[in-house]
Image (spheres, rainbow, N blue to C red):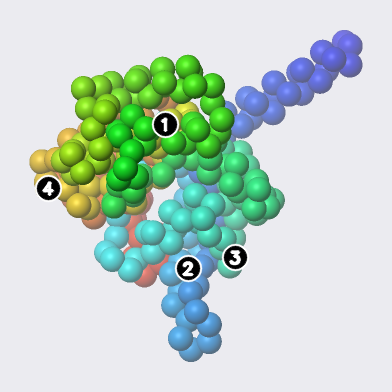
Amino acid sequence: MTESTTGRSAGTAVADERRAAPMVRVENVHRSHGSGAAAVHALRGVSFEVPRGELVALKGRSGSGKTTLLNLVGGLDTPDQGRITVDGTDLAGLGEDGLLALRRDRIGFIFQSFGLIPILSAAENVGVPMRLRRTDPAEREERVGLLLSLVGLAEHAAQRPGELSGGQQQRVAIARALANRPALLIADEPTGQLDAETGLAVMELLRAVVRSEGVTALVATHDAQLLGLADRVLELSDGEIVEH
């Protein structure tokens, strides 16, 4: 076997091992805010895995640690103790540039507040992540059109966020989160500002996106109706996983 063949075989083995591993692995993670007697223990020894291709819901009361956990998995914060691996990469081994690249290229974020840029059209909002990545303009426009069609907003491409309903704005935000073909979607209460019917439609869209785009999703929600659409539910209480 030649050296180049050996190198290819080793590379293939590493790629296969990564694909077989969970998309997210959280091991004995602790996170506190503040110090001393005033410290708030947001997470206390949390451990779980998110298999590839699944939609996993994270439930718990306000203050249970859901947002803190999502921020840690998304590389927006670092744990005091423990280990987090995303798509085969140990986040502790990444510097600021590495974390930035991870968030740009491999993780898509969806927030309760939508986070769209008011002066840009729906299509321009979806295209922002690809502009930051310097994607070829023709490829970018094709991807924007595909994603707007995927979320049912092809006819609203030229409209600005203020001209769209809350549900439509969240659909634009979902399309934007998918722009750079992430491996993982992180959604923090994505239906929190929507009425029950619209929220259910958005959650069903997320469920469909996980299947059609082949991504993994970790979604925090307090809505019991939406939990039924998840492949698995994790419950957080006082910073600990209490139910799988």
Which residue type carries mark 3?
Gln
Query: Which residue corresponds to mark 3?
Result: 81
Which class describes the residues within 10 Å of circle 3: few (<14), some (14-19), or many (20+)? some
Tell me the kind of residue under disc 2: Arg
Q: Which of marks 2 and 4 is nearer the N terminus?
A: 2
Q: How far apart are marks 3 and 2 (CA)?
A: 9 Å
Asked if marks 3 and 2 touch (Cβ < 8 Å), the reply is: no
Q: Gap between marks 3 and 4, in whole Å?
A: 38 Å
Task: Give left or right: position of 223 versus 106.
Answer: left
Residue 203 at least partly seen: no
What's the amino acid at mark 1? Gly
Q: Which is nearer the N-term, disc 3 or disc 4?
A: 3
Q: Callout 4: 10 Å neighbours few (<14), some, many (20+)?
A: few
Question: Which quarter of the picture shows residue 174?
Answer: top left
Where residue 172 sits in the image (x, y, percent)? Answer: 29, 35
Q: In this view, does 34 lie above or below 68?
A: below
Q: Is mark 1 on a helix, strand or loop?
A: helix
The residue singled out by tag 1 in the image is 127
What's the distance in space between the residues labelled 1 and 2, CA to CA? Answer: 38 Å
- Rendered location of residue 231, percent (x, y): 32, 37
Q: Residue at x 18, y 38 (%)?
A: 164
Q: Distance between the residues labelled 2 and 4?
A: 33 Å
Q: Name the residue under label 4.
A: 195
User: For this rendering, which residue is in front, 145 or 197?
Assistant: 145
Cα–Cα gap, marks 4 and 1: 27 Å
Q: What element carries label 4?
A: loop
Q: Dots 3 and 4: beta carbons under 8 Å?
A: no
